[in-house]
Image (spheres, helix red, strand yellow):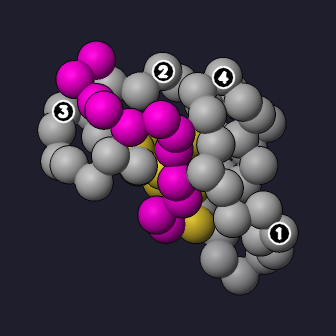
Amino acid sequence: MSDPGPWKPGEVVPQSGIYACDCGKVHLWSKSTDVRGHRFPPLPYDCSGQAWTLRTQAHPDTD
C-alpha cells in the first residue's frame, strides 16, 4: 500500500478493506467495507471526522 490516506468521502478507494472514520469515536456506521475502484461513502451523520482511514486490508498478501 503506497498511499497511507486518509481519504475523503467521494474519492476512489485505492485498496479493498475495512475503513473507519478518523474522528476516533465509535458510532453507528463508523466502519465501512470498501472495494478498490469504488468511491468512499459519506461519513456518518453524527461524525465529527473529515475522512476515512484503512483499518484492515482485504488481501494483505497482495500489495
Is disc 2 placed on a helix, strand or loop? Answer: loop
Q: Would you name the residue on which mark 2 appears?
A: 42
**First in sequence: mark 3 vs mark 1:** 1
Q: Are marks 2 and 1 in contact (CB under 8 Å)?
A: no
Q: CA distance from mark 4 to mark 2?
A: 7 Å
| Residue type indicated by callout 3 | Leu
Q: CA distance from mark 2 to mark 3?
A: 13 Å
Q: Give me the residue at 78% from left, 62% from top.
A: 3
Where the N terminus falls, by quadrant? bottom right
The answer to whether residue 54 shows anywhere in this view is yes
| Residue type indicated by callout 4 | Gly
**First in sequence: mark 2 vs mark 3:** 3
Q: Would you name the residue on which mark 1 appears?
A: 2
Q: CA distance from mark 2 to mark 1?
A: 23 Å
Q: CA distance from mark 4 to mark 1?
A: 19 Å
Circle 4 packing at 10 Å, graded few (<14), some (14-19), many (20+), is few
Picture coordinates of residue 58, whole percent (x, y):
58, 62
**First in sequence: mark 4 vs mark 2:** 4
Which numbered dot is residue 18?
A: none
Picture coordinates of residue 8, whole percent (x, y):
61, 34
Q: Are marks 3 and 1 in contact (CB under 8 Å)?
A: no
Q: Are marks 4 and 1 in contact (CB under 8 Å)?
A: no
Q: Would you name the residue on which mark 4 appears?
A: 10
Where the C terminus falls, by quadrant? bottom right
| Residue type indicated by callout 2 | Pro
Picture coordinates of residue 43, whole percent (x, y):
41, 27
Q: CA distance from mark 4 to mark 3?
A: 20 Å
**Viewer-proximal residue among 52 and 19:** 52
Q: Would you name the residue on which mark 3 appears?
A: 28
Is disc 3 placed on a helix, strand or loop? Answer: loop
In magenta, the rendered stretch is 45-56
Is disc 4 placed on a helix, strand or loop? Answer: loop
